[in-house]
Image (cartoon, grey):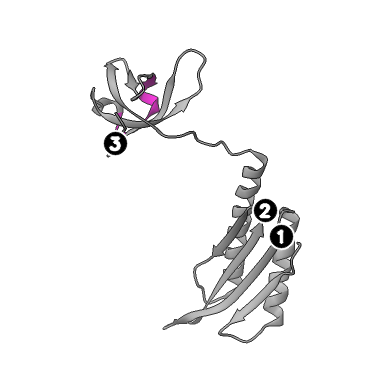
Amino acid sequence: MQRPFQIIFHGMSHSDTVEAHIREKMKKLELFCSQIIGCKATVEIAGKHKHQGKLFKVQLDITVPDKELVINHKAHEDVYVVLRDTFDAAKRQLEDYERRRRGDIKSHGNVLHGHVVRIDPEGFGFIETPDGREFYFNSANMVHPNFAKLEVGNEVQFLEEASEQRLQAKRVSIGKHHYPG
């Protein structure tokens, strides 16, 4: 970590035990993701619960290249439960960050718009975009509604799917979509 790790206590007195626990969890995150530039952990009393007493809340602000991750977790009466849940959520966000950085996450192309021009009762049809391109789709590509409720002229949105044979649409859905043209 390039910047010193900060731990802040709000509305409560400093606790060496809680600080040591946070530092231990932060070391595990650093082993998991070497891209962490800095981190600030804020532990505070979020309020009082009428039956259980004090509720603790933890916020992590983690800086990685090109991104600031902010992790909050629901308040709980046990500070260690909140710390566990917050650091688990941080790990998941760092996993997603690492996957994107390595290029492991597929980027979905732009959502295309068009209207249904032909439907075959065998379970496939064609969508025409405003620029005149025609995309094939089948019932398995329908997200909403099901294929049986589809009608010629319906405005739809979809993603382009790579195919060697023809232009194909996937994740086809009807809704309040307005396409130019």
Q: Which residue is mark 3?
A: 178
Give the residues drawn in magenta, as a range.
135-146
Residue 60 point in image, percent of width and height? 60, 66
Q: Mark 3 or mark 2, which is nearer the start of the sequence?
A: 2
Residue 18 in the image: state x and y as whole percent. 67, 77
| Residue 103 in which image quadrant | top right
Name the secondary structure under disc 1. Answer: loop
Under mark 3, the amino acid is His
Q: Amino acid at mark 2?
A: Pro
Residue linked to disc 1: 37
Q: Quadrant of the C terminus?
A: top left
Residue on which the image places disc 2: 65
Task: Rate crowding at label 1 as few (under 14), some (14 to 19) or many (20 or more) other CA atoms within 10 Å.
Answer: some
For the residue pair 57 and 179, the one nearer the viewer reads as: 179
Give the residue drawn at x 76%, y 62%.
2
Q: Residue shown at 65%/60% (left/top)?
A: 63
- Please say if 108 is above or below 118: below
Whether residue 177 sits left or right of residue 100 in the image: it is left
Mark 1 to mark 3: distance in Å?
A: 43 Å
Q: Earlier in the sequence, mark 2 or mark 1?
A: 1
Mark 2 in CB contact with mark 1 (< 8 angstroms): yes
Q: Position of 130 compared to 66: left or right? A: left
Secondary element at image label 2: loop
